[in-house]
Image (tube, rainbow, N blue to C red):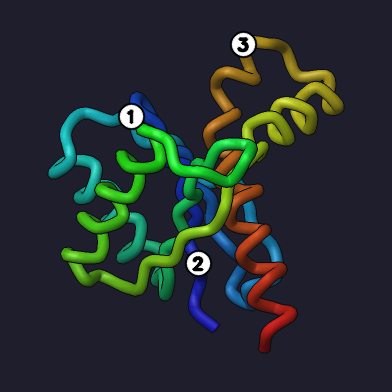
Amino acid sequence: MQRALGLDVGTRRIGAALSDPLGISAQRLTVIERHDPARDFHAIASLVSTHEVGVVVVGLPLTLKGTRSEQTKSVEEFVNGLRQRRACPVEVVDERLTTVEGHRALRSTGASPRTHKRLIDQVAAQLILQTYLDAHARTT
């Protein structure tokens, strides 16, 4: 199995996480500061190439009730842009509460609020990717 790249797409930053080669676990990778779509897509394409990624997994921010919001629409447009570039398949997973879970995980480590801000996007991407990997493991 090729590696999977998980993305937590925000308005200012994109958190990224990478799976191990066997597709069992997700690890934090980096944060991409957003500038414009072309630069964002180029940065992601670079990660895909460098890490030999076979699938990109993007968190879809639904509301707690499971409905779409303005942020959902923005992420869907981003996903469509990724798919048009055809570097590799792009999947979406429900990302409800991943940021909350990420903050909880960081608090449990005793990390400072400053560290939270720096790492939360990566941790959210890690949780998104782990959700995908766990679901994929059950279906294969």
Q: Position of residue 59 (x, y in %)?
A: 50, 49
Q: Position of residue 105 (x, y in %)?
A: 78, 33
Which one is earlier in the sequence, the residue at label 2 or at label 1?
A: 2
Type of the residue with mark 1: Glu
Mark 2: secondary structure: strand
Q: CA distance from mark 2 to mark 1?
A: 20 Å
Type of the residue with mark 2: Ala
Which one is earlier in the sequence, the residue at label 1 or at label 3?
A: 1
Mark 1: secondary structure: strand
Image quarter (top left, top right, bottom left or bottom right) of the N terminus: bottom right
Q: Position of residue 47 (x, y in %)?
A: 35, 56
Q: Is residue 16 left or right of residue 105?
A: left
Image quarter (top left, top right, bottom left or bottom right) of the C terminus: bottom right
**Residue drawn at the location 16% of the way across and 33% of the way down:** 36
Q: Position of residue 73 (x, y in %)?
A: 33, 42
In front of the other: 79 or 62: 62
Mark 3: secondary structure: helix
Mark 1 highlights which residue?
33
| Residue placed furthest toward the top | 113
**Mark 2 crowd level (few <14, some 14–19, many ≥20, 10 Å Cα):** many
Q: CA distance from mark 1 to mark 3?
A: 17 Å
Residues marked 2 and 1 touching at CB (< 8 Å): no
Type of the residue with mark 3: Arg
In front of the other: 91 or 72: 72
Q: CA distance from mark 3 to mark 2?
A: 28 Å
Residues marked 1 and 3 touching at CB (< 8 Å): no
| Residue placed furthest toward the left | 38
Task: Classify residue 20 by image quadrant.
Answer: bottom right
Mark 3 highlights which residue?
114
